[in-house]
Image (cartoon, rainbow, N blue to C red):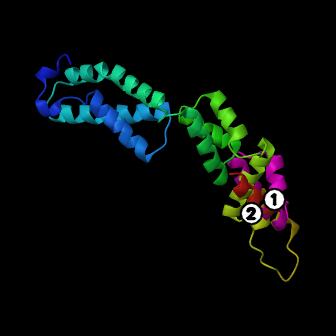
Amino acid sequence: MENTASLPQSNHPPQRAALREAALAHLARFGTTRQGLEQVLQRRLARWAQKAIRAGDCPDLVAEQVAALQSVVAEVVDDMVRLGAVDDAVFARSRVRRLVRSGRSGRAVQAHLAAKGVAPELRDEALETAVGTLGSTERELCAALVLARKRRLGPFALSSAPECEEEDAAALARQNRALGVLARAGFARDVAQRVLEMEADEAEDWMDRLRAES
């Protein structure tokens, strides 16, 4: 590549073969999106650039080398997409299942997928189809129940079996705190209210359905 002759041999920038190898190595360990793989390869170039500059190479020349490799990065990513090693739709469906099972709301899932570079239409499709036959309302309910179980809220709260009836003000305060936990996680108030008022047996039935569907 032009200008590489002026660089010490040890400081040559990573070429297509090295970038492709780095992409394959990453994909062998992690699922990712087109944007995610691009970021992996860009970080590879950034590490090389920092090392070259520390070794005394001209920063302007290093920047030229990095700029010249941008098209190579794009080509490597395109190759991975054509091979099927990178598929944003498959990634989105897999990630939706995992996030719902961990108690993430639809709003939180959308934000997560957007940050990974998944297109809006693929995010919507994944949310609609990734968790078996569960509809959007049922999916939200199940995810909220997962979070409630983690935080011991509603049907999963620890029973203290008090000797006397609890004061209404204390019960209301606990209810409001629980609603706040679910609201901050992105769940609508009607979903949160339904979860907090649910009986333990019904909650477990929903948990069983989520496990079966996902």
The image's mark for residue 196 is 1
Q: Element type at marker 1?
A: helix
**Which range of residues does the magenta coloring cover?**
179-204
User: Horizontally, is 55 left or right of 152 in the view?
Assistant: left
- Distance (Cα) linking label 1 and label 2: 7 Å
The extreme bottom residue here reads 163
Type of secondary structure dominating the magenta stretch: helix
Residue 72 image position (x, y, % from top left): 34, 23
Query: At 59% across and 34% down in the image, what residue appears?
Result: 89
Residue 167 in the magenta stretch? The answer is no
Q: Quadrant of the N terminus?
A: top left
Q: Residue furthest front?
A: 83
Q: Residue at x 79, y 65 (%)?
A: 155
Residue under numbered circle 2: 153
* Residue 19 in sight: yes
Note whether 180 is above or below 94 in the view shown: below
Going by the image, does 123 lie left or right of 30? right
Instruction: Name the spot of residue 176 as percent of width and height, x first.
Output: 78, 57
Under circle 2, the secondary element is: loop
Residue contact at pointers 1 and 2, CB within 8 angstroms: yes
Q: Is residue 84 above or below residue 190?
A: above
Q: Amino acid at mark 1?
A: Leu
Neighbourhood count class around disc 1 (C-alpha, 10 Å): few under 14, some 14–19, many 20 upward: many
Chain-order first, disc 1 or disc 2: 2
